[in-house]
Image (cartoon, helix red, strand yellow):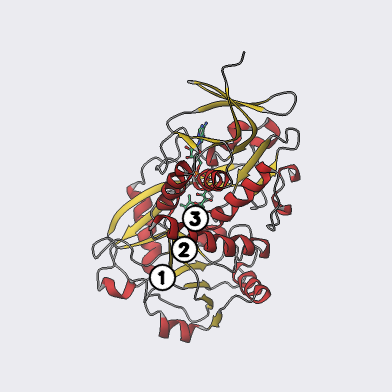
C-alpha cells in the first residue's frame, strides 16, 4: 500500500503566484498542499523589496488589462479578510523621455500602447505635456519633449504582505503549507496523476502547479529551459535630502520613465517608509543572465554609484543611497507570461508571470490557476501565454 499522501492539487513554489493559487484553491474547498524551498515571503526570488507598481492600462498589451482589473478587486477582498493594507492608490505617471515610442517589457511603444489600452477599456486617464507634468510633479527634471500618461487608479502593492496574507488565509481555509522543503522532482504518473518528490518524502496529486519563479527551468525539459532567462535586478532606496512630504503618496505618484532602450527605464515609488526611509527607485538590467541560486548577491558600490548618477539626472533628490537589494527577473523570448498546461503532461500546470511586471496580475492569476486545476472556467484570456508557443 502506498504511504504517499494524495492531494487534489499541489502547488510547488509559494511566492507571488503560488500563494495566490493556494489561497484561491483552498477558498474553493480543494484538498491542497503548498511547498516552498524557503519560507515565503523571503528575499531569494522575485517578490521582495516592499513595493510593486500596479497600473490598469498595461502598455505591455491589452490582454493584460483584465488581469490587472480583477487583481485590484481581489486585493481589496483580501484587505477586508485580513485587515491588512495591500494596495495603495497613488496615481501613476508614465512618460517617455527624449525618445518617443520606447520599449518596456517586450512592448515596442510602451506609452503609446498604454494610452491605447486605457481608451479601449475606458480606464480613466489624462495625456499630459511637459508643461503640465512640471506643474503637477515638479519633483522630476524634464527636458521639454516628454509625453506623459497619468492614471489616477495606479499605485503600488506590498508583495511580502500579499504573500503572507494569502498563505495565512489559505491555511485558515484548510491548505497545508510546508516551507523549507525543496521539491527535487515532479514526475508525471501514467494514468494522470503526478508525484512530487522532496527529501522528506513524496506526495501525489491530481494536478501540480509549478510556480517556482526563477527556478522554473529546473522543472522543464531541455527544449523549454532556455525560454526562461533570469536577470539579476537592483532596487535602491535614496535619501531625498529635502522635505520628504513632497514625495508622500498624496503628492508623488508611482512612475515609469522610458527612453531609448529597454535598459534605459527608470521607475519608482513615493515614500513608504517613514521620514528617514527615502524613496525607492530602480531601472532594468538585461546585460547578462544569472543562475537563480547566485542571483541575489549583494548590490555593489559601483551599482549604487551608477544608479545615483542616473537618478539625479531625472529627479530632484539627493545622492545618498540608504539601502539596496537584489531581486530576480525571469524573461521569456517574447516577453509574455507562461500560464498553461504542460503540452505532454496535462496534470502539470506551468505558471511563470515573467518579464518584470507580473506581481500586479498575481491575484487574478491565482484565481485563474485554481480554475484550471479544478476544471472550472475563467473569463481571463491566456491564449498568448501558451508554453507550446516555444
Ligand atoms: C526588481 C523587480 C521589480 C519588479 N517590479 C514589479 C512591479 O513594479 N510591478 C509588477 O507587477 N511586477 C514587478 N516585478 C515582477 C514580479 O515581482 C514577478 O513577476 C513576481 O514576483 C514573480 O512571482 P513568482 O511567483 O513567479 O516568483 P517568486 O515569488 O520568486 O516565487 C517562486 C517561489 O518558488 C520557490 N521555489 C523555487 N524552486 C523551488 C523548489 N525546487 N522547491 C520548492 N520551492 C521552490 C521559491 O522559493 C519561491 O518562493 C518585479 C520583479 C523584480 C525582480
Of 93 and 77, the residue lying toward us: 77
Q: Are marks 3 and 1 in contact (CB under 8 Å)?
A: no
Mark 3 residue's CB less than 8 Å from ligand 1: no
* x and y, in percent, of residue 242 in the image: 25, 72
Residue marked by disc 1:
314
Residue marked by disc 2:
266
Mark sitting earlier along the chain (2/3): 2
Q: Are marks 2 and 1 in contact (CB under 8 Å)?
A: yes
Mark sitting earlier along the chain (2/1): 2
Of 16 and 168, the residue lying toward us: 168
Residue under the point 69% across and 50% down: 385
Q: Quadrant of residue 272?
A: bottom left
Mark sitting earlier along the chain (3/1): 3
Label 3: which secondary element: loop
Separation of residues labelled 2 and 3 (CA atoms): 7 Å
Q: Does the rendering let one see residue 249? A: yes
- Image quarter of the N terminus: top right
373 displayed left or right of 74? right
* x and y, in percent, of residue 37 in the image: 46, 32
Q: Quadrant of residue 305?
A: bottom left
* x and y, in percent, of residue 271 in the image: 33, 66
Residue 284 circle label: 3
Label 1: which secondary element: helix
Badge 3 density bin: few <14, some 14–19, many ≥20, Cα 10 Å: many
Amino acid at each position: 500500500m502506498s504511504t504517499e499522501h494524495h492531494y487534489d492539487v499541489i502547488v510547488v513554489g509559494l511566492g507571488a503566484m503560488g500563494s495566490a493559487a493556494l489561497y484561491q484553491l483552498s477558498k474553493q474547498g480543494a484538498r491542497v498542499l503548498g511547498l516552498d524551498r524557503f519560507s515565503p515571503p523571503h528575499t531569494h526570488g522575485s517578490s521582495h523589496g516592499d513595493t510593486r507598481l500596479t497600473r490598469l492600462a498595461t502598455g505591455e498589451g491589452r490582454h493584460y488589462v483584465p488581469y490587472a482589473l480583477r487583481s485590484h478587486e481581489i486585493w481589496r477582498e483580501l484587505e477586508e479578510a485580513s485587515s491588512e493594507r495591500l494596495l495603495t492608490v497613488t496615481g501613476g505617471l508614465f512618460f517617455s523621455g527624449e525618445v518617443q515610442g520606447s520599449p518596456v517589457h517586450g512592448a515596442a511603444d510602451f506609452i503609446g500602447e498604454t494610452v491605447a489600452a486605457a481608451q479601449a477599456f475606458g480606464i480613466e486617464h489624462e495625456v499630459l505635456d511637459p508643461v503640465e507634468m512640471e506643474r503637477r510633479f515638479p519633483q522630476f527634471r524634464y527636458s521639454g519633449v516628454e509625453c506623459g500618461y497619468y492614471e489616477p487608479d495606479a499605485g503600488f502593492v506590498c508583495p511580502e504582505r500579499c504573500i503572507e496574507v494569502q498563505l495565512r488565509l489559505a491555511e485558515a481555509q484548510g491548505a497545508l503549507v510546508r516551507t523549507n522543503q525543496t521539491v527535487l522532482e515532479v514526475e508525471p504518473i501514467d494514468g494522470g496523476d503526478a508525484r512530487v518528490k522532496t527529501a522528506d518524502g513524496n506526495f501525489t496529486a491530481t494536478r501540480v502547479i509549478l510556480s517556482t519563479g526563477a527556478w522554473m527551468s529546473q522543472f522543464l525539459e531541455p527544449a523549454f529551459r532556455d525560454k526562461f532567462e533570469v536577470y539579476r535586478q537592483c532596487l535602491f532606496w535614496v535619501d531625498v535630502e529635502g522635505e520628504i512630504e513632497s514625495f508622500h503618496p498624496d503628492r508623488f505618484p508611482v512612475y515609469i520613465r522610458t527612453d531609448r532602450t529597454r535598459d534605459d527605464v527608470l521607475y519608482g515609488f513615493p515614500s513608504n517608509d517613514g521620514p528617514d526611509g527615502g524613496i525607492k527607485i530602480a531601472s532594468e538590467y538585461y546585460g547578462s543572465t544569472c543562475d537563480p541560486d547566485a542571483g541575489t548577491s549583494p548590490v555593489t558600490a559601483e551599482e549604487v554609484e551608477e544608479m545615483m548618477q542616473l537618478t539625479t539626472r531625472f529627479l530632484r533628490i539627493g545622492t545618498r543611497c540608504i539601502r539596496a537589494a537584489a531581486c530576480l527577473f525571469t524573461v521569456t523570448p517574447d516577453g509574455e507570461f507562461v500560464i498553461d498546461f504542460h503540452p505532454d503532461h496535462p496534470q502539470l500546470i506551468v505558471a511563470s508571470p515573467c518579464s518584470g511586471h507580473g506581481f500586479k496580475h498575481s491575484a487574478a492569476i491565482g484565481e485563474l490557476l485554481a480554475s484550471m486545476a479544478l476544471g472550472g472556467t475563467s473569463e481571463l484570456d491566456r491564449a498568448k501565454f501558451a508554453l507550446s508557443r516555444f
